[in-house]
Amino acid sequence: MPNRTRTSPIPHSDLMTRRTRNRILLPVSAAILLVIIALVTALSGLVYTPLVAGTLALLPLGLATAELRRLIADSRDILREMASIAEKNEEVINSFSHKIREPLNNLVLLGTMLKETTSTPKQQELIDTFIASTGSMVDVVNELTMETAGNITFERRGEIRFRLGPIIRDTIELMKLNRNHDQSVVTYDDHGEGTGEYRGDPIVIKQILIDLLSAAISGASGKVSIKIQAREAGVRDGSEKIEFTLSSNNPVVFIGEKRQPYPLAGRLIRDCGGNWQESTTGSGSWFVFYINLLKAEKLVAPTAASTLIRGMAEEKSRKEMKDLNILLVEDNPINQRITQLMLEPLVKRLETARNGKEALDMFGTVRYDLILMDVQMPVMNGLVAAEKIRRLEMSTQAHVPIIAITANAMLGDREQCLAVGMDDYISKPIEPEVLIEKITALI
């Protein structure tokens, strides 16, 4: 049987190049040639030849124009398709992260509780090995999350009211998820500028900083120390010009002056109407970039009871952990039980709800000091439940702190939780000490 050669598929870029050459460049070249002939013959005194040549030039020019329009339309369709693929990839990573963090969270909490129990040296050694192995799994998931956060792009979201300080600090915490950055030190030098409130998409700021910091840390040798500063640098076209400065203790390359095409950070800065400057000396490096943000208007009246109560913080009597009545909203029975084992010895009472609707019903009949709210639940998810609770509080002028406890750890999840009125956010796997610190800070 004769061998048949299998034709390899032609890359899409080659097809676009051929299409551009054959259907646009060649007709345009023919039109230009006919126009030149028309001009030369006209200068020679001929009458009919220039007229015919000029008329014929319109035909290939019209064909090229029509093909150019089709090419632009096809390119838009391709861009939309690529955006859809990127969005689906993000959903897959998010789903994977969520599903694996649930059991990982239980393993971390169980390991922590087992370590605190009395055991023989051999059992203690096995528990330490178990905790170390679980920690390695957590690092792998965190690296995947961090890698995704550093490479995906984001569509513009609706305007969110935010402060610069918490956004920058949260970005630094997100950077700590990556084990490759353990030898780096990133600090935020806040002289009060971080309290300024703006309107816009804080996720873009996070993405810019993550991309810049990742490039600087991965491209440097040895330990890197980077300091972040942010300040207002004047008003431009009704927007506040914000200047961010990243300074390093040794020579690093954040973007690179001649790098083309620009990496994600550069493109996002340009999309925000900003620009950047980069300089390197023997003793360090500096990267200064500007973006334009809308200044948030001052609130004449609180939009939710939570803002009202925050203004009365000095009048609120603080409670001890042992006096707390906590509502845990969690649909997974195993997660419920493990959280109960962790918190019940520390608080007065811990009640559970299986979804947001049950939580709303219980919230209307019992007074709670704090709510631990899962996000992804059947019947009613945690975001909807938190928003409804805040609406109920508007008529009662009461405020119950809500902490989102979720397996979602992708970039932007924290902003989603805070936007609906939650007070804080912690992603699984949970470190018991961190959860207790967050509870203590809110009661």
Image: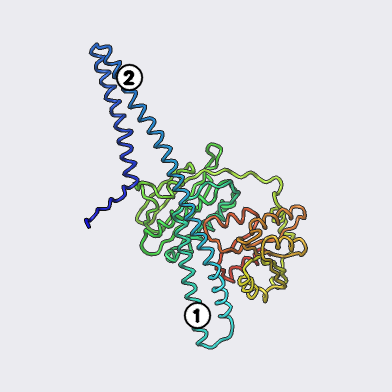
Residue 55: numbered disc = 2
Residue 386: numbered disc = none
Mark closer to the chain start, 1 or 2? 2
Task: Compute the Cα span from label 1 to label 2.
Answer: 86 Å
SS at badge 2: helix
Image quadrant of residue 332? bottom right
Q: Amino acid at mark 2?
A: Thr
Q: Amino acid at mark 1?
A: Asp
SS at badge 1: helix
Residue shown at the point (54%, 63%) measured from the top left: 98
Residue 79 vertical position relative to residue 441 in the rendered view, above or below: above
Check disc 1: other Cα within 10 Å, few if <14, some if 14-19, many if 20+.
Answer: some
Residue 165 vertical position relative to residue 267 in the rendered view, above or below: below
**Residue 214 locus on image (x, y percent):** 42, 57
In the rendered structure, are the residues bearing label 1 and label 2 in contact, judged by CB atoms less than 8 Å apart?
no
**Residue 121 locus on image (x, y percent):** 51, 87
Residue closest to the eye, 18 or 373: 18
Residue closest to the eye, 5 or 244: 5
**Residue 305 locus on image (x, y percent):** 72, 53
Residue shown at the point (55%, 77%) measured from the top left: 111
Task: Please tell me whether mark 1 or mark 2 is closer to you in this view.
Answer: 2
Residue closest to the eye, 321 or 409: 409
**Which residue, given by chain and number where applicable, does mark 1 sit on?**
128
**Residue 226 locus on image (x, y percent):** 44, 58
